[in-house]
Amino acid sequence: MSGERAPMTFPILSVIIALPVAGALVVAAIRRKELVLPVAVASSLVTLGAAVWMLVDFQVGEAGFQFVEQATWYQPWGVGWHLGVDGISLLLVVLTAFLFPIALAASTAITRRVREYAMAMLLLEAGILGVFLCLDLLVFFVFWEAMLVPMYFIIGVWGGERRVHAAVKFFLFTAFGSALMFAGILALGFLGGEGGPTFDFVRLLDADLSRTAQFWLFGAFGLSFAIKVPIFPFHTWLPDAHVEAPTAGSVILAGILLKLGAYGLIRFCLSLFPEASVSLVPVLAVLAVIGIVYGAIVAIVQTDVKRLVAYSSVSHLGFVVLGIFALTSQGLQGGVLQMVNHGLTTGALFLLVGMIYERRHTREIGQFGGLGAVMPRYAGIFLFVAFASIGLPGLNGFIGEFFVLIGSYLSLPWYAVVAALGVVLAAVYLLWAYQRMFTGPITLEENRGLRDLGVRETLILVPIIVLILFLGIYPKPALDRIQPSVDSVLQRIEQTTDYRVPDFGTGMAGYEVVP
Amino acid sequence: MTGTLVSLAILLPLGGSVVLLFAGKRLPEPLAGVIATLTVAGAFGCAAVAAVDFLTGAGEALTVRWFDWMPAFGVDASLGWDRLSALMTLVVTGVGALIHLYSIGYMKGDARFGRFFTYLNLFIASMLILVLADNFAMLFVGWELVGLCSYLLISFWFERETAAAAGKKAFIVNRVGDVGFIVALMVVFAHFGSFRFDTVFESAPEVLTTGTATAIGLLLLVGAAGKSAQLPLYVWLPDAMEGPTPVSALIHAATMVTAGVYMVARTGAIFGMAPIAAGTVAVVGAATALYAATIAVAQTDIKRVLAYSTISQLGYMFMGVGAAAYVAGVFHLMTHSFFKALLFLGAGSVIHGMHGEQDMAKMGGLRRKMPATFATMTIAWLAISGIPPLAGFWSKDEILGTVFERGGAWTVLWGVGLLTALLTAFYMTRMMWLTFFGEPRWDDGVHPHESPAVMTIPLLALAGLSVVGGLVNTPFRTTLEHFLDPVFDAVRLAHVPTGSTAVALAGASVIAALIGIGLAALRYRDRVPDETGFAWRLMGRGYYVDDVYGQVFARSGKLAAAWLAFRFDARGIDGAVEGMGALTRKTGGWLRPIQTGFVRTSAAGVVLGAVALLGWFLWRGGL
């Protein structure tokens, strides 16, 4: 994590976090209800613009944090405003800024308390961006908790029939994790600081933690993140939350919120507790592989298409976790990239499910059949996204899975072999669902007159389709930005533990490690 | 220059499919098909011009680099142009262009005419990526993309439930094979640190132990068995006949299903180090050849005869490449693509003329109504039966001869191959007689007619190729062997028999074929015998293997998944969670009798819990 760039004159990261908050304030002041969503979309597009600016300005090939902003708030406690972005968080920040305008634009079905809804979404965006960008653990925790509140309301107020139950379940699960993490953060701050506590991530990297302390802290942080990911067996809040959440809530939940857990595992667990991480690899790898296979098998027989996609997330996030704990460059690159990929494909799948729900007010797979004939464009896009999720080469999911599978074979061969079964199962649950929904004769009269996708709906999906293709065909720009940072995480682990990234092969012609 | 042509060969059909995807609906009907056909013909032209240097002997293998792809694996998106990929490209685009042309007639009036050619063009581009890949990762890309096109085209008439189910089945069974392929890729990268063919094959002798080479070979075989419909993963191919017949001809007979054969030939350097893996390839091939031939004997659907015949012929190719007779295997791949494409297109012409009828029991006497179809199919029938001097004779005989020449246990495989040859001649003759000879058994209102020229011209072209295609590699003139020599330079090739042995073996093959033809001609000459006995039903249903798979994997799998989902997950794991939730609620209610806010209760819990844990941490941390 060395070689931080000098503080920028323009605090782009603070601006990125502040823009959605400003947007929420603007929305609060709007009188006319029909202007609320357009303004919210516009304000999130401004945030996207800022995020893209950051992406363009990001120096490729540097491992450390960039655009760093640092200001100490209270020296005795070592608390301060410390922001920075590296290859691990960069694409997740851009993904967040990219998915929010889409999710908001897809929220036209929300008619009740639109203003509060838009504000909750924008505050949620600010909270998520804060979590990804913040390098002070106490402030990170504030963002982490702050983010839960709007999400809780989005599910609990604008959700489906059993929304309150789902919202409470979501809250209890995550609050339980939060309690552990908060204790962990405090303990880490006091144990890790020299001459007084510190909550500064970069300073904590140099903390000399005993093996025992590392295990306890890994447990406190890791459990919280594991619930968020979710890692088997902490996943059961996810299907409930998804089914009850409104479309945009599901898009953000699956597209971004789940990644916070995986991001936390890399950023905090691997970096701050390397010895514990190395020792706990077998545990995490077993759970990841179980998640891959189990999530996929359970997805096969779901009758609600939203639950199906939710369980597919359990499976896909299993790949992410396996890639992370493979502790190889390829595995970690795949893990980070797969977070972005899953955000795009699952986000798109939830948008698509929302679009059919708005027409038929059901998500039961059995209520459809033969839709391909009446909604050809919808069917085509659904199949395209499904294949991206299945991991078809040429589309984004393949690159991530390929990196994870090959990368984890290098260090965890048998786990990787079992995980490879996931590629069969993904085809089973998605293509079977597609078959039941879109092919065969039209069995129900209600489905006969369904409208195909309109211009607005198509335009919402096109940006995701473009990115799915781009990352699938030419992933190098993304990987070039991820690689230095994950390599430096691995270097740190090698420096502080006796773990060594396994050697492989001899003929690495054309492979250059970016310095 | 050559590099540009090779790239164009892929980009033309790829561009065609993109254009047709967006404009296909707006184009008038034949135009979409014409554009698609021209792109493939153009690809053939590019490949032919690029291959001229190889024919004159001047050409060198070259790599066409497209762009940096996956840096951490050291692979680019790049193409390898050598003699093997050149041959494959010519076969794929040549046969492909003819089948595109034929499809203009066959798909006439289909509601999704443009979409059909979108997929067909995409298939050609994908297949070319497969055969032109210069590394394992690109090969895998093409491998998966042809699987996608196969899925899309089998379930092209998706309103039919059987078609949709068949497409899905094809993709999933192929993916089962792909697990083997992916694990092979893992092992390759772990040992070589590269996916590039040149790096891997050059350093294989130093890097690989026999055990590792065997493992890689067997894993690749799993993938190949999926794509090339070999035992035990062949079950998707008969169902794939649900697709439009040109699809069966192009993808499920002439090109895609040969990908497994191509892959084994391409990775000959690894199989050369792993005699057990190579032997397994040959045994799987021989077993599949015989097994599928016995099933083909008892089919009543004309397309299913051809489907099982394809599985059986692919078995021959596997036998060949497994015996290190790479040239023979690739040779048979080529000739088979001519006559099997012809057989399928001919069957399509019959089905077209019979208004969609596929049951041979309702055909008969078609030779007078469909003279061009009959004449061309006769050539294909004799070619696949192994009658000299037609194409199938030379290539099949070269495989059988090489297998025999290796001696020992290989002689058994030769015997299996010979028996299969007899059966092949038998079931093909049966098919010809039931279809074209005897009295008409047509349903009322069926008025068979010959197909239009756009369909018969490709038949004639393929018939021509089925006649002369075998002459490129005969014991007298081994042109193909010389052509491919540089590719298999480093690989120990099995020997082709010469002299009196060769003559005797060829004689045995021809006699087997004649016996098969004679027996079938006698049996079906003047009647349709009753074929409903136990043995016929057993063979007709493919020994019920597919039914057993359905019970074991599909049905039991679903039951197990349902148990996991609705018992274990919903009641077990989530039940525990909900139980804890209820407990929390009760405790909350006890702590704070105001029942309104679980959130506030939990928030209090967060703080209390955090403080308690902090104390614990600080105490432990002091250790």
Image (tube, helix red, strand yellow):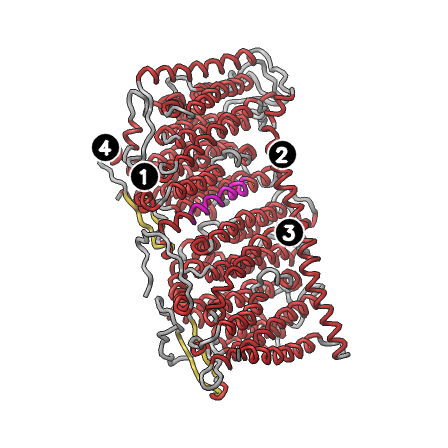
Q: How far apart are marks 2 and 3 (CA)?
A: 37 Å
Rendered position, A427 above or below A256: above
Q: Which of A393 and B28 is in front in this view?
A: A393
- CB under 8 Å between discs 1 and 3: no
Any part of residue A336 in sight: yes
Q: How crowded is mark 4: few (under 14 residues within 10 Å), some or many (20 or more)?
A: few
- The amino acid on which the numbered mark 2 sits, given as a three-letter code, is Asp
Residue with the mark numbered 4? B56
Q: Farthest residue in the left direction? A: B58
- CB under 8 Å between discs 4 and 1: no
Label 1, secondary structure: give it: helix
Residue drawn at point x = 40 percent, y = 29 percent: B320
Residue drawn at point x = 32 percent, y = 53 percent: A508
Label 4, secondary structure: give it: helix
Give the left or right position of residue B453, taking residue A351 as reference. left
Residue with the mark numbered 1? B46
Q: How far apart are marks 1 and 2 (CA)?
A: 46 Å
Quadrant of the snapshot with the C terminus of chain A? bottom left
Q: Is the magenta stretch mostly helix, strand or loop?
A: helix
